[in-house]
Image: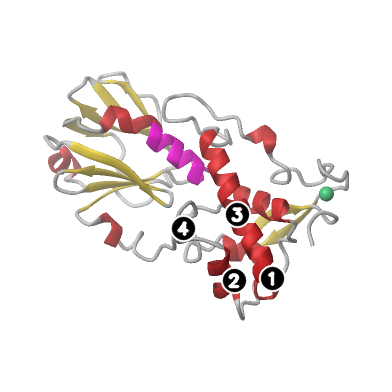
Amino acid sequence: MPELPEVETTRRGIAPYLEGQRVTRVIVRERRLRWPIPEDLDIRLSGQRIEAVERRAKYLLIRAESGSLISHLGMSGSLRLVECGLPAAKHEHVDIELESGLALRYTDPRRFGALLWSQAPLEHVLLSKLGPEPLTDLFDGERLFQLSRGRAMAIKPFIMDNAVVVGVGNIYASEALFAAGIDPRREAGTVSRARYVKLAGEIKRILAHAIERGGTTLRDFVGGDGQPGYFQQELFVYGRGGEFCKVCGSTLREVKLGQRASVYCPRCQR
Ligand SMILES: [Zn+2]
């Protein structure tokens, strides 16, 4: 599933080809995504100049003159640029054609993604309740400490809660907890301020590094410019249950927390 670094990598990959361009036509071959693509998307977008390509959490906001296209890649979605008129393969549901002769093509085999239109995207019901971006100063260890007081839930689902901070998916939560030496099963409300400061720093470091490296190459994600990332080899715990810890050699354990598989090192993480 594309996580925040992959979405940011996509944004950086596609933005230079979109910004300043006028949309000439929108072709929708399959409207049934997680929510149906609006019937009037072609009418709304055609003729509009794209002013910016922004990101909020895992949503891409393609801002045009009279509104924004809100895009979410879901489980298996991707966006890339193709020549206008390139025949579409299966699962290539939408083309947004530009005056440059390129088209932004949306592909999504599982169709859990979304393409929606909004005049005020940050006030849209999907975005309005989101917590702060992890790489801004609005997110820090003090926020985690304050919000966690009195919370009995495990720390891993706590930091994956979008109301606490956005964009900390399973991979990055697992890796940041390992780097901070915190057992993912630990009750959120019992973790000290100092440990939350360390954890927030690791979340920022790991996400920034993943963005720099172009995200992971899990499943069928391909970067916006067609170049897959290569962060995968650097994972310490995610997806490595039963393997040896790269730091201490212990066997990594796997448990379920908040319905998600969670791998941790019983010696390095307390
Ligand atoms: Zn270890």
Q: Residue at x 78, y 57 (%)?
A: 269
User: Closer to us: mark 1 or mark 4?
Assistant: 4
**Distance in Å between CA atoms under marks 3 and 4:** 11 Å
Query: In the rendered image, which residue does mark 3 sit on?
Result: 201
Can you give x and y, in whole percent of width and height, for residue 67 in the image?
Answer: 18, 49
Query: From mark 1 to mark 4, how far is it between C-alphas?
Result: 21 Å
Give left or right: position of 98 versus 232.
left
- Measured Cα–Cα span from mark 3 to mark 2: 13 Å
User: Mark 4 falls on what kind of element?
Assistant: loop
Q: Which residue is mark 2?
A: 145
| Point 81% across, 40% down: residue | 246
Q: Earlier in the sequence, mark 1 or mark 4?
A: 4
Q: Label 1: which residue? A: 191
Q: Secondary structure at mark 2?
A: helix
Magenta stretch containing residue 176, yes or no?
no
Measured as percent of width and height from the top left, residue 157 is found at: 61, 63
Kind of residue at disc 3: Gly
Quadrant location, the C terminus: bottom right
139 or 19, nearer to the observer: 139
x, y percent for residue 201? 60, 54
List the residue tagged with mark 4. 137
